[in-house]
Image (cartoon, rainbow, N blue to C red):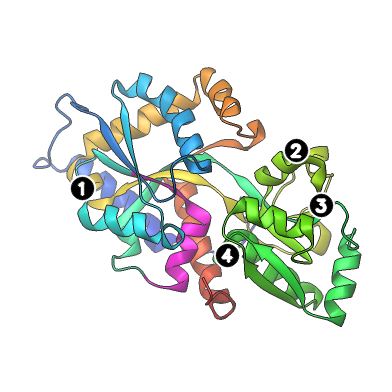
Amino acid sequence: MTRNIKLNRRTFLSTSVAATGMALAAPHVARAAGYPEGNINVFIPTREGGGADRNFRAFSSIWKTKLGTDFEPGFYPGASGRVGYEIYMGKAEPDAYNLIFGNMGPEVLNWAVQAPSFDVNDYLYFGRVDTDPGALFVGAESKLQTLDDIISEGKKRKLNVGTSRMAHPASIGLLALGEVTGAQFNLIPLSGGKNTVAGAVTGEVDFSVLTSGSLIAAGDSVKTLLVFGENRVGERLDNAPSMNDAFGTDLPEMLSSRAFGIHKKAVDDHPDRFEILQRTFKEAFEDPGLLDAYVASKGTPEYLNYGGIEECAAFKEAMLELGAKYKPLLTGA
């Protein structure tokens, strides 16, 4: 995924993974003992009925059959996901009966822009569900119909660009594009995917950036010109090229990537419980019913993509590093 980017993530991985291994070997730690004996609470830092909710319900409908218990979601929208994480880290018991289900890309960028009240290494993601790359798009009737149009116009004047929220992987992709081409962009947060699509379609902004699954859903009302990652769906994104292929960059994929996370203390104190969570999570991916559930929830099948601790940790670290780099341009987050 990182395409040769040099990431300094050894410390994080050694802390998370090695600590897990030591906990497994420690004789005094709590054992699983029939875990789970009750439902698993899941903190979702966005509104009910949104994309994360649909994704969660699709995945948990399969996972619960492997784990042998149900999942109880709680929704905590606010401050681009910050509210949900603060509540989870501050109030949820670290006993492996409380998980968080977040969108790693934009939510981790929050911590780079403004540090949370907790240590970002005190939780870890262990189960990635999907990888949805960000993309640059115009309204179907826009005067800017090609990447050359956008770059040329962006060198004449600063273009207004819609984004669902400032601290978003697609926003990072756009800022990287400006660095490479010299075009000037002014990011404008439009509060959510629907508004970001509408901004480009109505001409409220010159164009927009957003996760590509939303563009597939928007159909012929938009035209995709660039993908900040691999274009896995071809014509459904107008055969748009990837940023790296088009400009010879080495940018990691700028993803909306939803994943389950857990307190690191729960991993350390309850390693057997954590092993069960990891094992059954992977078993859910091996169940053919998962793809049907994901598609029924309006998910793009090519984006259903398993990832474990290491994949999630690499992406988390990449977002923290890029967020720090572009922090001066994301202070409106």
- Spatial CA distance of label 2 from label 3 is 11 Å
Question: Of 86 and 219, which appears nearest the observer?
Answer: 219
- Looking at the rendered structure, which numbered label has been put on residue 143? none
Residue 17 shows up from this direction: yes
- Spatial CA distance of label 1 from label 2 is 39 Å
Q: Which residue is rendered at x = 78% and y = 44% of the image?
A: 237
Q: Residue tagged by mark 1?
A: 94
Q: Are marks 2 and 4 in contact (CB under 8 Å)?
A: no
- Looking at the rendered structure, which numbered label has been put on residue 233? 2
Q: Is residue 227 above or below residue 69?
A: below
Provide the residue span drawn in magenta. 100-115
Q: Position of residue 104 (x, y in %)?
A: 48, 53
Label 2 Cα neighbours within 10 Å, binned few <14 / some 14-19 / many ≥20 = some
- Say whether disc 3 or disc 4 marks the residue closer to the N-terminus: 4
Q: Which residue is rendered at x = 15% and y = 43% of the image?
A: 26
Q: Which residue is rendered at x = 31% and y = 60% of the image?
A: 86
Q: Residue tagged by mark 3?
A: 241
Q: Position of residue 169 (x, y in %)?
A: 59, 60
Horizontal relation, residue 48 to residue 153: left or right: left
Q: Secondary structure at mark 4?
A: loop
Main structural element of the magenta stretch: helix, strand or loop? helix
Q: Residue tagged by mark 4?
A: 6
Count the numbered circles shown. 4
- Spatial CA distance of label 1 from label 4 is 33 Å
